[in-house]
Image (cartoon, grey):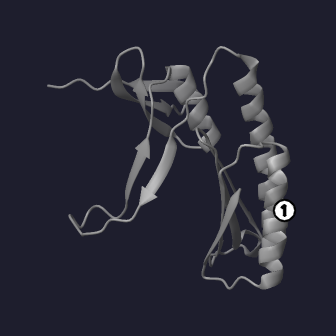
């Protein structure tokens, strides 16, 4: 597993880097096929000192992305809490994934790329992602695993790109685009 550590508005000491690598590498016990682990550390100026130190942990396998973000008064606490949350996400993912052996894993690998040229002032960042056909249920599962409010996917049944989203009434919605 490759571990990438990025920082924003903070210096990473050798001791902190070693601690992060040691703790994140232990996640392979729970999910052995992790290709990459990315740890983003940042400090934000907030009113509450308890929420200033932020750790975002992202794991990528060949077909799944898991993400956890935690805020605390110090980075070590944020890291430990993010690792606990990630462990629970891995257990939940494995339970859903292996509960039905006939179902294939179908989460896309999201790839961020920086915009090489400024095309429009409105577009600040551009993301591209790889996907394969999946069912609506699999798209909802991936959306929940990522912790997002919506998810774009290629629907295997309709053979079109669709969007599943979380509604305020705790249900889900499905957008089926049609060409005019």
Q: Is residue 121 left or right of residue 115?
A: left
The quadrant holding residue 18 is: bottom right
Q: Percent position (x, y) of residue 53?
A: 72, 73
Which residue is rendered at x = 45% and y = 36% of the image?
131
Q: Percent position (x, y) of residue 178?
A: 23, 23
Q: Is residue 121 above or below residue 106?
A: below
Which residue is rendered at x = 24% and y = 67% of the image?
121
- Can residue 169 be seen in this snapshot? no
Q: Is residue 39 left or right of residue 50?
A: left
Label 1 crowding class (10 Å Cα cut-off): few <14, some 14-19, many 20+?
few
Q: Percent position (x, y) of residue 159?
A: 34, 19
The one nearer the camera, 166 or 3, is 3
Instruction: Check disc 1 and report the residue beneath it.
Output: 23
The quadrant holding residue 98 is: top right
Is label 1 in a helix, a strand or a loop? helix
Q: Is residue 164 left or right of residue 64?
A: left
């Amino acid at each position: 597993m490759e571990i990438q550590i990025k920082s924003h508005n903070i210096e990473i000491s050798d001791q902190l880097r070693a601690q992060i690598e040691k703790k994140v590498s232990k996640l392979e016990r729970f999910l052995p096929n992790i290709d990459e682990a990315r740890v983003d550390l940042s400090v934000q100026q907030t009113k509450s000192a308890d929420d200033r130190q932020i750790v975002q942990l992202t794991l990528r396998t060949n077909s799944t992305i898991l993400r956890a973000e935690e805020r605390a008064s110090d980075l070590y606490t944020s890291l430990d809490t993010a690792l606990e949350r990630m462990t629970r996400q891995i257990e939940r993912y494995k339970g859903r994934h292996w509960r039905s052996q006939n179902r294939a894993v179908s989460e896309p690998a999201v790839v961020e790329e920086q915009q090489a040229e400024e095309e429009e002032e409105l577009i600040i960042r551009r993301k591209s992602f790889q996907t394969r056909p999946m069912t609506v249920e699999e798209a909802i599962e991936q959306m929940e695993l990522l912790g997002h409010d919506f998810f774009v996917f290629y629907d295997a049944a309709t053979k079109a790109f669709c969007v599943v989203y979380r509604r305020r009434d705790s249900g889900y919605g499905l957008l089926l685009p049609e060409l005019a």
